[in-house]
Amino acid sequence: MSLGNGESRISRAKDKVKLKAESVDVFYGDTQAIKSIDLDIFENEVLAFIGPSGCGKSTFLRCLNRMNDTIDICRVEGRITLDGKDIYAPERDVVLLRAQVGIVFQKPNPFPKSIYENIAYGPRLHGLAKRKAELDDIVESSLRRAGLWEEVKDRLDKPGTGLSGGQQQRLCIARTVAVSPDVILMDEPCSALDPIATAKVEQLIDELSESYTIVMVTHNMQQAARVADRTAFFHMGDLVEVDSTDNIFTNPQDQRTHDYITGRFG
Ligand SMILES: Nc1ncnc2c1ncn2[C@@H]1O[C@H](COP(=O)(O)OP(=O)(O)OP(=O)(O)O)[C@@H](O)[C@H]1O
């Protein structure tokens, strides 16, 4: 598959490990969905997860902020650390963890509240603002970071659900940013968006990677090539290989990766 000229992102040097997965297995009841995955995720990188439907990309992504805890039959084994600390340790505050490792879903899911309240909710919950003026500042800066401020500054009291799909997705990104995360997980964040809204979110991912570590699941290989420093290929619960996005698309080491990127399956 040709990715076209200039589409691949130039890798920046990354060295500090932000998230580390060691021998991670995930089961839904008796069925194993993730098989002994080891992966280092570096600070401020954009890492894309690709692979055929059902290979476990979303399952593994959800391990990184314990979203799988919400699925009764799901069991996670192994060890995942954030800045060297076990995120599955019994004393870990999961609400705080999910602020540190925020998540943006495929379908924009604003709260049925005003645009302002969508952003203000998290900072209020986590006690990040003492006064209304501080909260106003967080709301404005988060919306600015998500590239949405100019479009919504005169309608902050209007429902978030009244925005277009692309605006709603940027509102959800602003909501994640508002609680000062370290990592932002994105599960196919553009799959419900049109090409223009997709381009805006991709541009935003590039800007946000200056400040945050970003891990995204995508079905769109061109999108991985445009936004990701590194790409990880999953197949039937295995992490087959992870490398610079350029290497994955031009010189994959595993036949399964080769077959997938050349469109032979998936
Ligand atoms: N809540 C669940 N209960 C039971 N099995 C599940 C659940 N969620 C996922 N699975 C199973 O785990 C496996 C991996 O699914 P997962 O959604 O992680 O894959 P994926 O690579 O993200 O797929 P897609 O690209 O289609 O979203 C699949 O076999 C799926 O059926």
Image: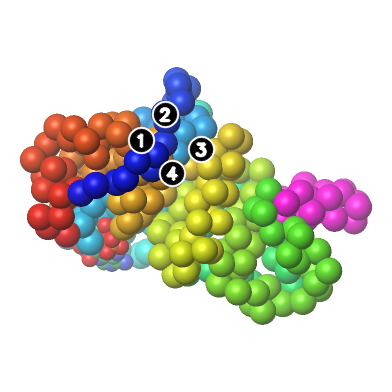
- Label 3: state its secondary structure: strand
Task: Indicate the colouring scheme.
Answer: rainbow
| Marks 2 and 4, how far apart at CA | 10 Å
Residue position for label 3: 213
| Marks 1 and 3, how far apart at CA | 12 Å
Along the line of sight, which residue is nearer the eye, 190 or 173?
190
Residue 11 image label: 2
Asked if the beta carbon under badge 4 is closer than 8 A to the nearest atom of ligand 1, the reply is: no
Q: Is residue 50 above or below residue 151?
A: above
The image shows a total of numbered marks equal to 4
Give yes or no for contact between labels 1 and 2 (Cβ–Cβ under 8 Å): yes
Q: Is residue 16 above or below residue 22?
A: above
Along the line of sight, which residue is nearer the eye, 231 or 129?
231
Residue position for label 1: 230
Image quarter where the C terminus lies is: bottom left
Taking the image as four quarters, which one is ligand 1 found in?
bottom left
How crowded pointer 3 is (Cα within 10 Å; few <14, some 14-19, many 20+) is rated as many
Q: Is residue 193 above or below residue 231?
A: below
Residue mark closest to the camera, 3 vs 2: 2
Majority secondary structure of the magenta segment?
A: helix
Say whether residue 150 is magenta. no
Q: Give the residue at x 65% y 53%.
A: 146
- Label 1: state its secondary structure: strand
| Marks 4 and 3, how far apart at CA | 13 Å
In magenta, the rendered stretch is 122-144
Which is nearer the N-term, disc 4 or disc 3?
A: 3
Give yes or no for contact between labels 1 and 3 (Cβ–Cβ under 8 Å): no
How crowded pointer 4 is (Cα within 10 Å; few <14, some 14-19, many 20+) is rated as many
Say whether residue 136 is magenta. yes
Which is nearer the N-term, disc 1 or disc 3?
A: 3
| Marks 4 and 1, how far apart at CA | 9 Å
**Residue 257 appears in the rendering:** yes
